[in-house]
């Protein structure tokens, strides 16, 4: 059975406050490096640079930073242990960031 990433953007209603699902990766630059390094070493750096050149501000796509700005808002980090798209280490980093608040 194949595995899938659960980082699909979604907004879910929970009581009176919305629950927003953020991307499952820590930041887009690290995610691109992860995805492309499996194919060709250092290609992830070129992928991030190409995305930036095409107008995608990869530096602003930082889930870890957004998570740290949520303050005392309840947070829930979900990760699949068999997820090939997003490394388990990223989910652990997001969980640590969430607990620090």
Image: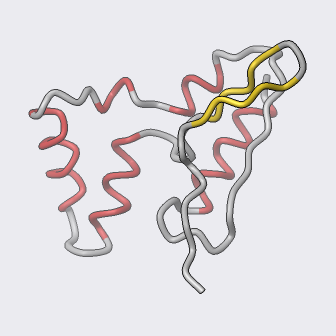
Q: Is residue 29 left or right of residue 99?
A: left
User: What residue do we see at 70% from left, 17% from top?
Assistant: 70
Tell me if residue 16 comes above or below residue 81 in the rendering: above
The image shows residue 20 at horizontal and vertical percentages of: 66, 27
Q: Quadrant of residue 53?
A: top left
Q: Quadrant of residue 27?
A: top left
Quadrant showing the C terminus: top right
Q: Residue at x 64, y 46 (%)?
A: 93
Residue 89, percent across and down? 60, 58
Q: Could you say which is closer to the camera, residue 17 or residue 46?
A: 17
Question: In the figure, is residue 45 to the left or right of 24?
Answer: left
The N terminus: image quadrant: bottom right
Picture layout, residue 70 above or below residue 31: above
Task: Locate residue 31, reporting x and y percent.
Answer: 40, 51
Q: Residue at x 74, y 26 (%)?
A: 19
Q: How is the image coloured?
A: secondary structure
Instruction: Using the image, determine if residue 9 lies above or below residue 87.
Output: above
Q: Nearer the viewer, residue 96 or 10?
A: 10
79 vs 101: above or below: below
Q: Is residue 93 left or right of residue 101?
A: left
Q: Residue furthest right?
A: 15
Residue shown at the point (38%, 41%) measured from the top left: 28
């Amino acid at each position: 059975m194949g595995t899938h990433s659960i980082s699909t953007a979604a907004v879910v209603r929970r009581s009176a406050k919305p629950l927003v699902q953020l991307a499952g990766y820590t930041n887009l630059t690290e995610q691109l490096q992860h995805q492309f390094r499996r194919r060709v070493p250092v290609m992830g750096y070129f992928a991030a640079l190409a995305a930036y050149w095409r107008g995608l501000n990869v530096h602003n796509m930082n889930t870890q930073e957004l998570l740290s700005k949520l303050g005392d808002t309840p947070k829930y980090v979900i990760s699949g242990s068999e997820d090939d798209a997003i490394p388990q280490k990223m989910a652990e980093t997001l969980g640590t960031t969430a607990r620090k608040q």
